[in-house]
Amino acid sequence: MAPRSAAARLLMLAFALGALVGGGIMLLVDRTMAKDDRPPTQEGGYLGRLTSELSLTESQQSSVKEVLRRHEPAMDSVWAEVRWQFDGPRQAVARDIRTLLTPEQVTKYEAYLARRDSAQRAKGKHDPK
C-alpha cells in the first residue's frame, strides 16, 4: 500500500509542478503581450483579455494600461534574470507541437516561430541560443 501512496503523491506533485510552470509561462506571455501596440480590446493581449473577461470601460482600460506600464521595469528586471530558464521548456513545447502537425503545418509553424523570435529580438525580449 505504501508504494501506491507514494506513487500517487509523486503524480500529484508532478501535476502541481506542471501547473505552476504552465501558469508562470502564461503570466510572462501575458505580460509581454500587454506591451503590444495593439488596441486593448484586440484578442490576445493581457489587457485585451481583461477587457473581454471583465467588461472594462475605456477609463478602466486606460488605468490598467498605466498600471502595467508602471510595473514594467520591475517585470523586465525579473524576466531578464529568469528568461534562460524558459528556453528548455519552450523548445520542448515546440518540439512536441511539431509532432502533432502535418508537414505543411510544420512549415507554417516554423515560419510563425521565426516571426515571433524576430519580433522579440527587435523588442529586445529574446536572446536566441
Image (tube, grey):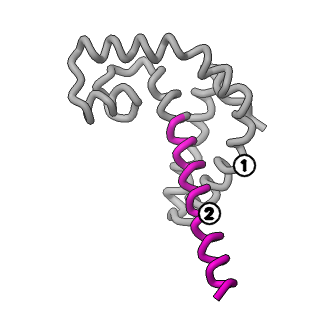
**Residue 18 % position (x, y):** 59, 56
Q: Is mark 1 on a helix, strand or loop?
A: helix
**Residue 6 % position (x, y):** 67, 76
The residue to which callout 2 is attached is 13
All told, the count of numbered labels is 2
Q: In which quarter of the image is residue 51?
A: top left
Question: Which portion, as a residue range, is magenta?
Answer: 1-27
**Residue 113 % position (x, y):** 58, 42
Residue at x-position 71% and y-position 25%: 80
Q: Is residue 5 magenta?
A: yes
* Residue type indicated by callout 2: Leu
* Residue type indicated by callout 1: Gly
Residue 45 relative to residue 93: left or right:
left
The residue to which callout 1 is attached is 88
Q: How far apart are marks 1 and 2 (CA)?
A: 20 Å
Residue at x-position 54% and y-position 54%: 19
Between 99 and 36, the residue placed more toward the observer is 36
Q: How crowded is mark 2: few (under 14 residues within 10 Å), some or many (20 or more)?
A: few
